[in-house]
Image (cartoon, coloured by chain):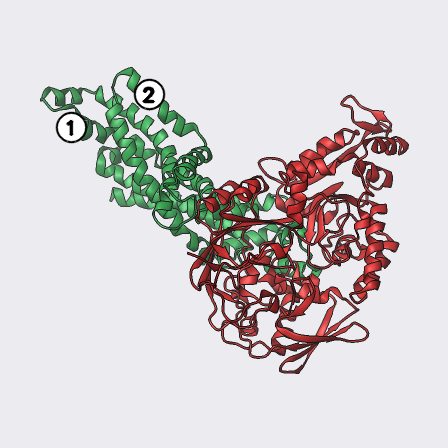
Chain colours: A green, B red
Amino acid sequence: MTVLRRVLTRLAIGIGVLWGAATLTFLAVYLIPGDTALLILGGPDARPTAETLAQVRADYLLDQPFLVQYGSYLGNLLQGDLGQSYRLRLPVSEAIGQQIGATAALAAAAVAVALPLTFVVAILSAQRAPWIRSIVSGVEVVFAATPTFIIGFALLIVFSFTLRWFPIGGNQGPAALILPALTLALAVFGTLSQVLRNELEDVLEQPFILTARSRGMRDLPVRIRHALRHAAIPVMTMSGFVVAALLGGSVVVETLFSRQGIGSLTLASVYNKDLPVILGIVLLSAAVYVVVNLVIDLLYTLIDPKVVTA
Amino acid sequence: MGLLALLAGCAGPAGSSSVAAGEPIPGGVLDVSISAEPGCLDGHGISATQQQFLGRLIYDNVVTLDENGDIAPYLAESWDVSEDGRTYTFHLKQGVTFSDGSPWNAEVLGQNFEHMRDPATKSPLAAAYIAPYVDGTVIDEYTFEAHLAYPYTPFLYTLAQSWLGMNSGKAITESPETLCQKPIGTGPFTVADYRPGQSISYTKREGYDWAPEWLDGDGAAYLDGVEVTLVSEPVIRHQSLVSGQYDLTENLAPQNASAVQADPDFTYENLARTGNPYVLNFNLNRAPFDDLAVRQAFAAAVDTKAVTESLGFGTYTPIDGFLSKESRYYDPTVEGVLTHDPERANQLLDDAGWTGRDGEGFRTKDGKRLTVEVPTVESSTPSPLLVQLQGEARKVGFDLRIIQLPQAQLTELRYAGDYDALAGVWHTNTTDVLFIRYHSSEITGERIGQNSSYVNDPELDALLSTAREADDGPVAEEAYSKAQHRLLEIVPGVPLYENPSQFAYANTLHDVAVDTSHPVPVLTYAWKAE
């Protein structure tokens, strides 16, 4: 019962988050200076007639006051209609639908690289000689702090331009996925690994670890079976960071590697002030965030039932 | 280097379509990278530069410009122009079909004109080009009469541009909302799959057999298909071409030009686009550029050749006039009229009363600094062109300020005329570009005009009107020549360099033709050797 209640509360909060995100973004894009109708018609180099301009304003309610535009947007949203893209002239759900697969594949590949890397490095480096820790931690800091663009470009120069092991860009085949996924993964690993190691080191000081060791358990099994279970929870709490890193990173990575996806769509939409698409992407990101946090929340209860009562 | 650039710039289409190495080999898919993607593939609904290249794959036009730049038959076999220049009778080619199976005929031509100017199409360009079109009459199945409000000789030229390609009449009637995503033309390829922001796959159209004569080929295309991918980073575009990932790239960055040129495995093309070259246009409506002397001073202050050389890594051609050298009726006597002369610039500014100097060394008049605001679209690094101009202008005491703005805001400012100068280009295949850019009726009002300099000169207006109404020939030539000289007297801006079309392709690709309407690759009869 408590679990069900917990889920329902979280869902209610989630819907609130979505509504808030939609409203704030709507307001933000609405307030960006510049005439959207002129932009829809091709920017400064177009020669549309006043009649065409009026038609565009009417079609997209741009001649209406804020509340009418906002009300119409929310009303359509409740009916599951995200609206029409100004630039692509097709439904937003379709515009996003076309791109989501590519970004999901990229994010999944990045997580598939980042998580094992994080766990292996953190488990092996916790409580080791200071020089080992300094080197590992130094590498992590570099990956965590260097802009994704630079990491991606460095990988491109080495593995594509020079060694020619991987294609330089595009979406064709699994080989084209490796460098972009690695770029995203390294940034995530850089942060997560540091957190996990610190937690592991705390846990390894606990009395129950000493008990386990005194029973003659070898070092690695102690780390994996006993310490990791406790240390993993703070790392899971950081899933929000991971989602943000993957979504934000995809904008850079997809542009750099000329990949299809939500990231490139975001960039093009912001540039073109394509409000319906921007709102659609924000809602999607917020929804992913809400769902991931809900799932993680439920996972806590499986890993450590004490969390529920806490 | 400068000479090299000039030679490259002059190498016309003739030097480009390489002599066929043996018999064409049918088959294969061509991988192409492009720098930007229009978001919509219906030429009537967009103004994107890439349309001229992309449109040639799927659309045919009513007429074409042949290898000499003369109007030639395409989907119209012939046409008559009435004595008063206001009625065009098109005799259409028979047996042409769109890829949805519907026929090409007089009714469809009329539907296309209506589609271009229908406000629902939201046309930023095509509608303006056919603005004088009043209505049309279907005389019989293959004869169409177009009525114009006034004589407008550029009509045929604009009809040869890919933005005015012919759409399926069936699609226009039944599903106009699908034209952006899945345009239906009569061209050599069809759109198989369009992923906005990523790629466009084209498939060869079986049974195609109505290519314009200048393409010198018959029947369907040799390539099975064309795969166009958006690669927005110039470095990546260059590297992925050289590594063999793509066969051809559009918009090759000038900094990579010499490397590609030196590589025997690639062909590099650097062709001037006809129309208005790259110009820093002044706003004649307000101070300080409402003063002719200040405009002349600015033009004399800029070392156009140095700026051009540095910007284009030696691949750009500087220009002295307001019309591209490749344009019809270009008058070479405009060369050398506006010259780099800092001494004269200083003298002009002194005479105009800008005699003071402030703490930073900028000129002042009545305590006001000689400031020039030039808005441009926001980017991570300021426009290299404007930075160069800033440096040039500073030498004689101008404070050129680069204002970076989001595209939407820049557009609004442009519409409102709230700027001192704007850098830009307008490429088109008709000398009527001078009308579009500098005739007083093209000042923003009823439509967003491209006379962003706010030139309002009765003498120039008269010359440009005479030229567009006259048939091709001596009357037009004389009027255009006088107009080019009149512009040098008004100085609505500083002409900088020819707007180039730079592209490159692997030498395994043969018979790439080049359009004279806008110099882009035409792939109808191109083929790949393996």
Q: Is B400 placed above or below A286 here?
A: above
Give residue A135's mark: 2
**In the figure, residue B478 lies in which quadrant?**
bottom right
Q: Is residue B402 visible?
A: no
- In the picture, the disc for residue A174 is none
Label 2 crowd (10 A; few <14 / some 14-19 / many >=20): few
Could you tell me which quadrant the C terminus of chain A lies in?
Answer: top left
In the image, farthest residue toward the bottom: B140
Residue A147, percent from left and from top: 45, 32
Asked if residue B490 can be seen in this view, the reply is: yes
Q: Which residue is mark 1?
A: A221
The quarter of the image holding the N terminus of chain A is top left
Q: Earlier in the sequence, mark 2 or mark 1?
A: 2
**Residue most extreme to the top:** A130
Residue type at mark 1 is Pro
Q: Is residue B186 left or right of residue A181?
A: right
In the rendered view, would you say B396 is above or below B48? above
- Is disc 1 placed on a helix, strand or loop? helix
Residue found at x 44% / y 29% = A146
Give residue A255's position: percent from left, percent from top.
Answer: 48, 43
